[in-house]
Amino acid sequence: MPRINIALALSVSTIATGFLLAGCQGSNPREKTIISGSTPTPAPSPTTPIGSGEGLKIGSLLPSTGDLASIGQEMAGSVPLLVETVNACGGVNGEPVTLVPVDDQTDPKAGAAGMTKLATLDKVAGVVGSFASSVSTAAVSVAVPNKVVLISPGSTSPVFTTKAQKGDFKGFWARTAPPDTYQALALAQLAKKKGYKRVSTVVINNDYGVGLEKAFVETFEKLGGTVVNKSNPVRYDPKAGTFDTEATAAFAGKPEAVLAVMYAETGSLFLKAAYQQGVTKGVQILLTDGVKSNSFPEQVGKSSDGKYLLSGAIGTVPGSNGKALAAFNKLWQDKKGGSPGEYAPQAWDAAALLALAAQAAKQNTGVGIASKIREVGAGPGTEVTDVCEGLKLLKEGKKINYQGASGDVDVDANGDVLGTYDVWTVGDDGKIKVIDKVSPK
């Protein structure tokens, strides 16, 4: 099991039953986001009558702390926003939706313990999570035997596709971010477009890093490129105290570009070490979704003359090009202020699919949700971008095809979506901006 640089001690905090999001203070209970604590509740039955009080209970398993906290906190903010929206328009199957949030700490052991709590103590039917592929690997092994649907808004390792093809998940796994086989193709196409023929790789040594590395090497070579360190890949241990040796190795062999697949906390230390050694001079840095946050250039730091070290770096990230994106951005602005971060739209869509599938199944269970995810996400019904409109049509017995804030979310038999990728860069002012799009098709 790959390990993340975080303490092994688990401290899963729970929040007593209450109401969040000050924007909804009306008397209607469906206009509030219900946040449940850890008090055990009876598991919903497939035959539970609608309106009996056995409402849909879902969880979130996302990193509020640890190596991915800077992105995870934005993702975690989307889920209660979706639940509040759903409850304001009547809930699911005649009852309000209840949310149980858990911090997975960007740690597989914490994620497994959190998933165990959600499945066996809180009795949730579905969970939005996790972000790190290694954490989702641990969590899904708990979710499947407990018949809880796990929808990840950001775990992109190709390993999940392979396991789904083998039948390991039994329909209880899906994701709203495309797998890294697609991002690897997008990155390879980007490198070729930029004219780079010799590229090296350095990756965090976990499911995400190694999976993307392998897919990129295969794809880039098919496009005629050479991976300089293919026979001796650099995979760094996030628990290491320094990264000087790995930085030297990653930039050896005169590559024109170096693909760095990292998480923000440890990746910033690695890149800072490389810049301080002077090995990055004249080499293009290629980055991925794991570090695309507004704070990352600041984490890497500036040179003695005040210039951002990451200036000119480019990367890819799953794009958000759905018809619902503008509405989602406006809702976020109205409720939270500012703009949503990376993967916030994917987290919104993951929660939306749980609610829509439960309504389509007319039961608030994991089994019911699993049976309807593909139908509401990629079925032949009426295209809808508004989750409330989708719920209304489903209550009327009609079929829908949900078009999400992150894209079409056409979930396939393996739980995968295709998606497109934004190409982003770091400016001289340290700000990140999207400059292009690339499709893995």
Image (cartoon, helix red, strand yellow):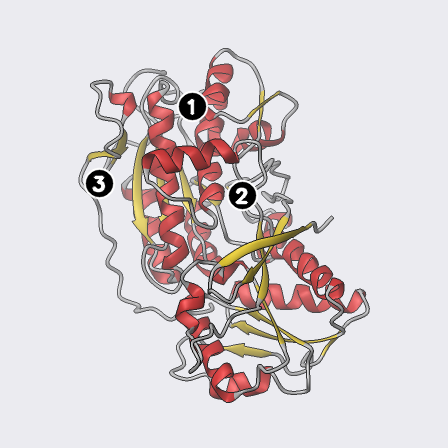
| Residue 37 tag number | 3
Label 2 and label 1: CA atoms lie apart by: 22 Å
Tell me where residue 61 appears, x and y as whole percent: 37, 49
Give the quarter of the image for residue 256.
bottom right
Tell me where residue 187 appears, x and y as whole percent: 67, 61
Tell me where residue 369 appears, x and y as whole percent: 48, 31
Label 2 and label 3: CA atoms lie apart by: 27 Å
The amino acid beneath tag 1 is Gln
The amino acid beneath tag 2 is Thr
| Residue 182 tag number | none
Q: In this figure, which residue is indicated by the disc labeled 2? A: 176
Alpha-carbon neighbours of circle 2 within 10 Å: few (<14), some, or many (≥20)? many
Q: Is residue 22 above or below residue 53?
A: below
Q: In this figure, which residue is indicated by the disc labeled 1? A: 363
Q: Earlier in the sequence, mark 3 or mark 1?
A: 3
Relative side of 133 to 331, left or right: right
Residue lying at the far top in this picture: please name it. 396
Q: Residue at x 36, y 46 (%)?
A: 76
Give the quarter of the image for residue 191.
bottom right
The amino acid beneath tag 3 is Gly
